[in-house]
Amino acid sequence: MISGDRVGYGLVVFDLSKYATIDGPGMGSRITESYLESLKDDKQADPKTLSAKELLVGGSGSDFISGKKYHVYQWMPMKNGELAKPVWNYFQRNEGRSIKAPSVDFVDVYTLGCVSNALHSARCGKAHCLAALQSTDKFTTLPQVEIILD
């Protein structure tokens, strides 16, 4: 991330089964398979998850109707109008590395603003980010980004 980048969040339809682990309270909820057992899949869900196109034209939820898939609305980070690189792997259709962001159908977009200063904005590890939620000392060592809000 560099100064001048526009950042925000995009609401997309996302299959929960693509997560390796789901962070949350309780030990059982951290295991994706156990968590999914507590949910209804797309076939059983009522009301159905609607794609952006179905929401626009008043559809019936016919895009996500198969069993063993768990589509929900999920806010994902965006940079310059595209998905941020750390979440690309959830949307890639082909194997291997890609230099272009995957094309997704945004249901809604919320723009935060423009990066004015990206101090120490190198990527830090997932374990460090998770530990920062519980420890002030870890939190203060995370990368700092200043954003001019829209």
Image: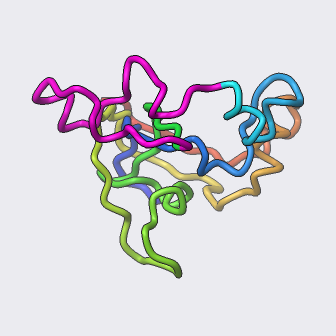
Q: Position of residue 56 (x, y in %)?
A: 14, 29
> Is residue 57 found inside the magenta-colored segment of the image?
yes
Residue 71 position (above or below residue 3): above
Find the magenta span and give its range: 39-68
Secondary structure mostly seen in magenta is loop
Please provide percent x and percent y for residue 68. 56, 43
Res. 27 image quadrant = top right
As drawn, which residue projects farthest toward the top?
A: 47
> Residue at image x 41%, y 37%?
9
Q: Quadrant of the C terminus?
A: top left
In-image side of 58 versus 48 (left or right): left
Residue 89 is inside the magenta segment: no
Examine the image and state in which quarter residue 36 appears.
Answer: top right
Tell me where residue 46 appears, x and y as whole percent. Answer: 42, 18
Q: Left of 28 or right of it: where is 83?
A: left
What is the image's colouring?
Answer: rainbow
Could you tell me how many numbered marks the image carries? 0
Residue lying at the far left of the rendered structure: 57
Q: Determine the residue positioned at 73% across, 45% down.
A: 142
The residue lying at 75 percent from left, 52 percent from top is: 126
Examine the image and state in which quarter residue 22 appears: top right
User: Looking at this view, is 6 or 147 the one in front?
Assistant: 6
Question: Which residue corresponds to the image point at 46% horizontal and 55% vertical from the top-left?
Answer: 84
In the image, is residue 137 above or below residue 17?
above
105 or 132, which lies in front?
105
Left or right, 5 with reference to 91: left
Q: Is residue 52 left or right of residue 135?
A: left
Residue 115 x %, y %: 42, 46
- On screen, 72 above or below 14? above
